[in-house]
């Protein structure tokens, strides 16, 4: 019986896995089975942490705004500050407010004076 030459599909699949896992350490980058397992684990972690990253940044922005609003002589809590922003219809999101709080604290003071009147 003649020898059957295999196709390239399985090799292409393994090469794709190896390329993905090429930065992994040890057997996780060399052995196909463990590389496949680590690839699945990495993709699960990246999917989970995309949502977690959004949550973490929102918490960071809220903390920065709260610190800046309490630091000035306004003595607002964060919730009162945001509530008054919405009442006066000043549409600034938390990311922008946090950047203002870091770069220009006087501007936060002016905003809080504007909404308190």
Image (cartoon, grey):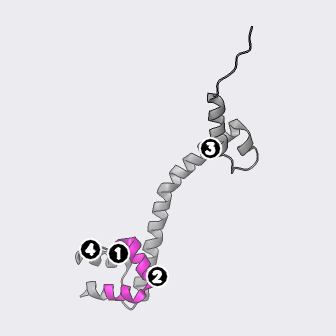
Disc assigned to residue 39:
3
* Circle 4 SS class: helix
Name the main secondary structure of what is drawn in magenta.
Answer: helix
Residue annotated with mark 1:
79
Which residue does the numbered mark 4 point to in the structure image?
Answer: 86
- 68 over 63 or under it: above or below: below
Q: Residues within 10 Å of mark 3 (few under 14, many from 20)?
A: some
In three-dimensional space, the C-alpha distance between marks 1 and 3, rounded to whole angstroms, equals 42 Å
Label located before the other in sequence (3 or 4): 3
Crowd around label 1: few <14 · some 14–19 · many ≥20 (10 Å): few
| Residue 102 marker | 2
Q: Alpha-carbon distance for marks 2 and 4? A: 21 Å
Closer mark to the observer between disc 1 and disc 3: 3
14 falls in the magenta region? no
Residue at the image point whose x is 49% and y is 58% from the top: 52
Height in image: 46 above or below 88?
A: above
Residue 59 in the image, given as x and y percentages of width and height = 46, 68
Q: Earlier in the sequence, mark 2 or mark 4?
A: 4
Q: Secondary structure at mark 1?
A: helix
Image: magenta residue range: 93-112
Q: Secondary structure at mark 2?
A: helix
Q: CA distance from mark 4 to mark 1?
A: 11 Å
In contact (CB < 8 Å): disc 1 and disc 2: no
Quadrant in the picture for the N terminus: top right
Work out whether 113 lies above or below 92: below
Q: Earlier in the sequence, mark 1 or mark 3?
A: 3
Q: Residue furthest top?
A: 1
């Amino acid at each position: 019986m003649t020898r059957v030459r295999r196709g390239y599909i399985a090799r292409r699949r393994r090469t794709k896995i190896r390329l993905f896992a090429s930065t992994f350490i040890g057997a996780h980058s060399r052995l196909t089975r463990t590389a496949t397992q680590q690839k699945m684990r990495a993709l699960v972690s990246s999917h989970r942490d995309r949502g977690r990253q959004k949550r973490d940044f929102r918490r960071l922005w809220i903390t920065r705004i709260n610190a800046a609003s309490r630091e000035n002589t306004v003595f607002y809590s964060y919730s009162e500050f945001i509530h008054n922003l919405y009442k006066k219809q000043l549409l600034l999101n938390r990311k922008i407010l946090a950047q203002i709080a870091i770069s220009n604290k006087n501007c936060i003071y002016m905003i809080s004076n504007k909404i308190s009147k």
